[in-house]
Amino acid sequence: MLVTIFVPWLANGDRKPAAPSNPLAPQSRAAPCGRQTRKVKTPLALHRAFAFGDWLLSARLSRSPTYNFTQPMSTIEAEIDALRTEALEALTEADGEAGREAWRAEWLGRKDGRLTLRLRALKDAPPESRAALGKSLNELKATLEGELEARRDSARADALAALSADAALDVTLPGRPQSLGRLHPVTQTMNDCIDAFAEMGFRVFEGPEVEWSRYNFDAVRIPDDHPARDMWDTIWIDTLIEGERQMLLRTHTSPNQIRVMEQTEPPVRVIVPGKCYRQEATDASHEWMLTQIEGLAVDEGVRMSDLKGTLYAFARRLFGEDRRIIFHHSYFPFVEPGVEMAIDCFLCAEPGSDCRTCHDTGWIEVLGAGMVHPEILENAGYDSSRYTGFAFGVGIERVAMLRWGIEDIRHFYQNDLRFLRQF
Amino acid sequence: MKLPLSWLGDYVDVDLPPAEFATRVTDAIAEVEGWEVIGEQWDPELVRVAEVLAVDPHPNADRLVLATVNVGDGPKTVVCGAPNVASGQKVAFATEGAMLIDGHSGKLSKLKLRAIRGVDSAGMVLSEKELGLSDDHEGILELPGDCAIGAPLVEAIGDVVFDVSTWANRADLLGIFGFAREVAAVTGQPLREPDRSYSQSERSASDFVSVTIEAPDLCRRFTASIIEGIEMGPSPAWMQQRLIRAGMRPINNVVDVTNYVMLETGQPLHAFDYDLVRGAEIRPRRARPGETLTTLDDIERDLDPDMLMICDGEGPVAVAGIMGGGNSEVSESTKTVLLEVANFHPGSIRRTSTQLKLRSEASLRFEKGIGPDLASYAQDRALHLLEQVAGGRPASGLVDAFPTPLPSPRITLPAARIEQVLGIPIEAGEVRRILVALGFDVAESGDAFEVMPPFWRPDVALPDDVVEELIRIYGYENLPTTVLRGALPEAQPRPLERVREQARELAAGLGFQEVVSYTLTSEEILSRVVPSTDEDRTGPLAAMNPVASQHTYLRTSLRGSLLSAYAANRHHEDAAMRFFEVGVEYLPTEADLPHERPVLCAVLGGQRLERWERPGPERLDFFDAKGAVETLLGVLGVEGAFTAEEHFAMLPGHSATVSIGDDSVGVVAQVHPDVAGAFDIEEPVFLIELWFEPLTRVIPERPDYSPPSRYPEARRDLALLVPAETPASALLDVIRTHRARGVRIAADVFDEYRGEGVAAGQKSLALAVRFRADDRTLSEKDVVRIEQGLLRRLEQDIGATLRA
Ligand SMILES: [Zn+2]
């Protein structure tokens, strides 16, 4: 039985552009990895039949698909074999992913692939040969699709292998520069201090840097002619308000104890961060502009042991869980009793090692503290027999210097990037 | 204060090694800042006490002598060059091998003996320099007479001198005896009082002098004693040695006694030559206008009527409590001494010494507050010593003007207060022990202690003052750590601080390095960046006593600080830099503290880094600054509008006001090259300022939210021709406000073009316009229809036409 198949031929024009041959593009099948190479399987017998060529030629010239079933089935089988041979040969020669995509369009294109057209024409085949013919054509389609996939896998594997080997990176080259900003080390340290106290229920309050002399000194029991004023060398403002009210740059954050208590009723639990100023010569451990954090807790039942517990928690949070603290006697006019707190030195292994930080005492003084003086409570209108309180003041630069081992306090406000970008 | 352990040992035994002593003292009494060990290198075998038996001339040298000394094992001959060596002296004597400071090189070296001018020397009589005590190499060191012959020198005069910093309210700790009392209380050792016994002559002191206090508010007590028959001369070696170790210079026996007693008790004293006191009377009174006095340091002092003077019958003889006058000074010819021990108002002493810029050992003690009763105590002690070391005969009795003796304060300390303040009780027996050891009287009545502080503790006035005495001696190491109890205070909303801190984090996240600058600056720097027409910011507050002239004025703008930081870093940074600071502008107000106006200021500029961390060809520009502001505001939940506007110190045409709604919140601009140049910045630099007060008013509690649309956007790119002066924002404003039923329209500018193909006076703006409906996918037809409407609107409103 002779079958002549007339296949419409369309110019290979308006096809989808070939996908770029990016081996990393997602594919429906998992790509093989590594350097494994897959060989394309080529059928051993390649039959060249002139009949096939004629058929092809006639199919290409024809504009309307008609079938000539005058040829016997065996001839059709042979032509399908020839078709397979031609297709696989073309696939072998297809160059890159673009070539493979063009090949796929030519043979398997959904609209007008050569095999697609033949499959579509099956409906016109005589019923008795339709099944056999269909089987053969579908087998051919499966073979072509399989080979295409295999070629693609192989190409992708080759490309990945090349990427891993030939295009391996020198990972020691510098990274691409990113725009970098950081918070100032004093800000960072302040934030950590605030967090530590906030966990214990302290609220943040802020007060003015330019302060009345009355708040800075008189209200915290440092009268004009008291030698305690020597503890705070003051930068005064040269303007008197209303001819008599003296302004200064606050020497400590302690006036805010008064400001807070004037504004609120117990319970009080605040921290007051901010800049302070001292009229003093600078050296490695003295700076005229400082950053402090003041703490104040006033309520019924606030005890000095609570002060110790609060500062203990703070010290461990900032300087490590294994820190120990001690109090020793000190004097600040606005507290009674007054203490200084020291932490055990974490910078020297043992006493006698010439530690610059603790001077071999094993202890580093960190802050001043005490129980709020009853007169200060009374002045704020609190009943000092009922309410007690504690207060403390921490120098933030000192904390930062201890944390990072900064040797000179004057680095902080020079704004040198070579310093700042280390934090 | 210098605290020699040997002196302290007169009053209390100390068996602790220096380091432990220092710790105990620091914990409970006052801060030990360090200590010096004297005699550490003196070998007890090789450096010992000797007595000089005889001094003979050297046979071969005029300047040398042969001294015969006894070190306890028979006479030895020593060659000596010191001019002051004399028979009967106790001296320090070293034999071969002793480690000494070489008199010439100043280095520690081993003593090697050799014959000097043909005479063998058995050892060496030592100077202070050779012993490492001072630089004095002129003569030998004369030891106190009570040193035992043959004793190791380190036992005789070795010492530890502690450097102690005491408190502003504790004059008693500036007396070594007062310090010893505290040490005794801490260690539990008994305290020994200094000897205050002396004999008295027939004549009464009041026959010699009268005292009339004319300013009882400033002079609370004045005691005077008279000592006749004074033999002026140097004080004994032991006293000189102690004065030197305590940091004072020996002068003569009378002055040395006054200093010695001051160092011992904390009470200053002053000796007058009685024969120079005119009119046999003393009148503490305020200075009279125009009065002057030449003080002992030879400086003529102008006095003013607030100052308390000690006057005799004719005029001032001393600035009370601070320094004596030269006109009544004791000298070699003094026969009779008038010894003043007085008590002055602490504040008055401090004011006067501040005014005269004259701080003395006396004024430092008086200004801290001394109990008036200490005056007679110190008189007794000084009279004892003057009798011992100056051969004086005290007249009987004191002339004591004490107009209003203060009653001893009584303090009632409820036992429960101790636990209320400390968190722990202290047992009654321990309370008594501590207070008694510190010199307090204490009685128990019911649940309270009746406490009477001693006269040397005027600082103790309240029950809590007593609690501090208890806990510091009881030991802070015995105070447990507990956790705060009770209710938490209510949280107050702090919107400005919230926005400010968020902005700070965002600025860092956007690549800006935070800086913190000195807030005091110079008028010159301020005038570069603040217009003289800005009434808020001109006339900055100034410091009366700035630390340096460039830190005189409180900044009313952060611009200068940031530009200075930029310029300084440009010396060592070659790529783009971005800095910001969050601070306040101190704006003077009429009759109050300045308004501290919070602001974020940032500067940026320089070449963008390329792949290899090298500055690339592209520079940061205005739109980097603007982009940072847009992002920052966007995260805060608002969209800023940028309007071209000139700002002082900024380059016209490159300067914008940032506003939100009707509120202007900031500036984005290129700094005027002339201004940048004044800061030594020779490249385009850009500035951002955002003020938090207006910003906080417009920032929503939380940003607007709408769920992501389920329908896709349609995007159309339009190229529009507009007059060149039309800002892009005008197009965007039209598009933003254009209403098409149920369709949201948004647009971004993605190109600006002038030149070929665009008529002069016009520019082409490329816009990506996005259309979206909330309820459907827009059809091509919908989009075309809306686009047509929008184009008509753009043409009508601002004359924009579609570019062909
Ligand atoms: Zn250490």
Image (cartoon, coloured by chain):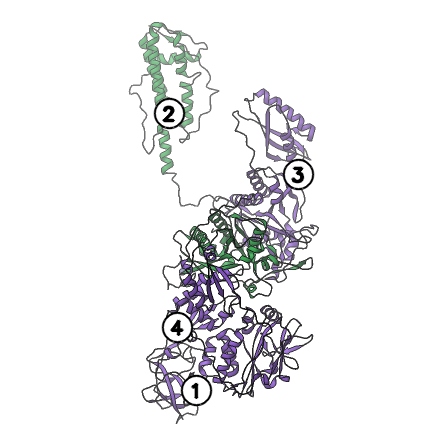
Q: Residue A93's mark?
A: 2
x 46%, y 65%: residue: B443
Please, what secondary structure does the residue beneath circle 2 have?
helix
Q: A272 left or right of B85? A: right
- For disc 3, the neighbor class at 10 Å (few under 14, some 14 to 19, many from 20) is few
Q: Indicate the colour of chain A.
A: green
Q: Amino acid at mark 3?
A: Asp
Instruction: Calculate the distance from the C-alpha at mark 4 to the C-alpha at mark 3.
Output: 79 Å
Q: Which quarter of the figure is the C terminus of chain B placed in?
A: top right
Establish if B152 lies above or below A364.
below
- Disc 3 and disc 2 in contact, CB within 8 angstroms: no
The label nearer to you, 4 versus 1, is 4
Q: What is the number of the mark on residue B662?
A: 3
| Residue mark closest to the camera, 4 vs 3 | 4
Identify the residue at horizontal 49%, vertical 52% (top origin): A185
Q: Which chain is purple?
A: B
Marks 3 and 4: in contact by CB < 8 Å? no
Furthest residue toward front: B446
N-term-proximal mark, 4 vs 1: 4
Dot 4: element: loop
Task: Classify mark 3: helix, strand or loop.
Answer: loop
Q: Position of residue B785 (x, y in %)?
A: 62, 21
